[in-house]
């Protein structure tokens, strides 16, 4: 294997799935902190009561439940697009006013997650996803000899 050549498609598809799973688990922690106060954040101090019909409540719902869909690779492309938008809003609303550069305004994670989600909006969920499972089942039905082809 030449290190300058791309990996085989099988391995890149598996790596895509692993990246999706890790990103989802990291992302869901932010949602669970907002919605459930878990894991507790020592830096932020006590968590005020959450109002679900608020911007923070919506962010918590998107981060936890959108992250859960993303974790399993269900509706990956539309969910990833929505989550990329949420991270863009988070960056420009919360972090950018604190300073120009992400390293200064502590917005590195928001920027990275925004672009990771944007990538998945185009790439899909990878081999280990509900989307791939459903795609395989629909192909299986179309390939069976009992299905009429148009």
Image (cartoon, rainbow, N blue to C red):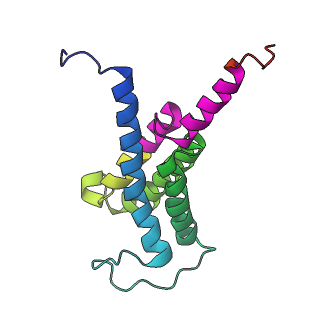
- Place of residue 72 in the rendered image (x, y in percent of width and height, measured from the top left): 50, 49
Towards the viewer: 7 or 133: 133
Q: Is residue 36 magenta?
A: no
* Residue 53 in the image: above or below residue 84: below
**Which image quarter: residue 97?**
bottom left
Quadrant the C terminus occupies = top right
* Residue 147 in the image: above or below residue 135: above
**Which image quarter: residue 9?**
top left
Q: Residue at x 41, y 65 (%)?
A: 30
Q: Is residue 139 magenta?
A: yes
* Residue 55 in the image: above or below residue 11: below
Helix, strand or loop: magenta stretch: helix
Residue placed farthest to the front in the image? Answer: 146
Quadrant the N terminus occupies = top left
Q: Is residue 144 left or right of residue 92?
A: right
Q: Residue at x 20, y 16 (%)?
A: 4
Q: Residue at x 58, y 66 (%)?
A: 58
- Place of residue 80 in the rendered image (x, y in percent of width and height, measured from the top left): 52, 45
Q: Is residue 70 left or right of residue 10?
A: right
Q: How many marks?
A: 0
Q: Which residues are magenta?
A: 116-142
Towards the viewer: 48 or 89: 48
Q: Is residue 69 left or right of residue 38?
A: right
Q: Residue at x 57, y 47 (%)?
A: 79
């Amino acid at each position: 294997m030449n290190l300058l050549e791309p990996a085989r498609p099988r391995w890149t598809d598996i790596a895509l799935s692993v990246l999706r799973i890790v990103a989802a688990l990291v992302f869901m922690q932010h949602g669970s902190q907002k919605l459930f106060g878990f894991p507790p954040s020592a830096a932020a101090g006590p968590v005020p009561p959450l109002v679900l019909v608020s911007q923070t409540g919506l962010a918590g719902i998107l981060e936890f439940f959108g992250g859960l869909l993303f974790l399993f690779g269900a509706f990956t492309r539309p969910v990833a697009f929505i989550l990329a938008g949420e991270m863009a809003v988070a960056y420009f609303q919360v972090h950018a006013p604190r300073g120009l550069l992400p390293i200064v305004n502590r917005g590195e994670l928001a920027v990275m997650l925004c672009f990771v989600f944007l990538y998945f909006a185009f790439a899909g969920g990878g081999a280990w996803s509900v989307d791939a499972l459903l795609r395989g089942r629909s192909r299986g039905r179309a390939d069976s000899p009992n299905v009429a082809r148009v």
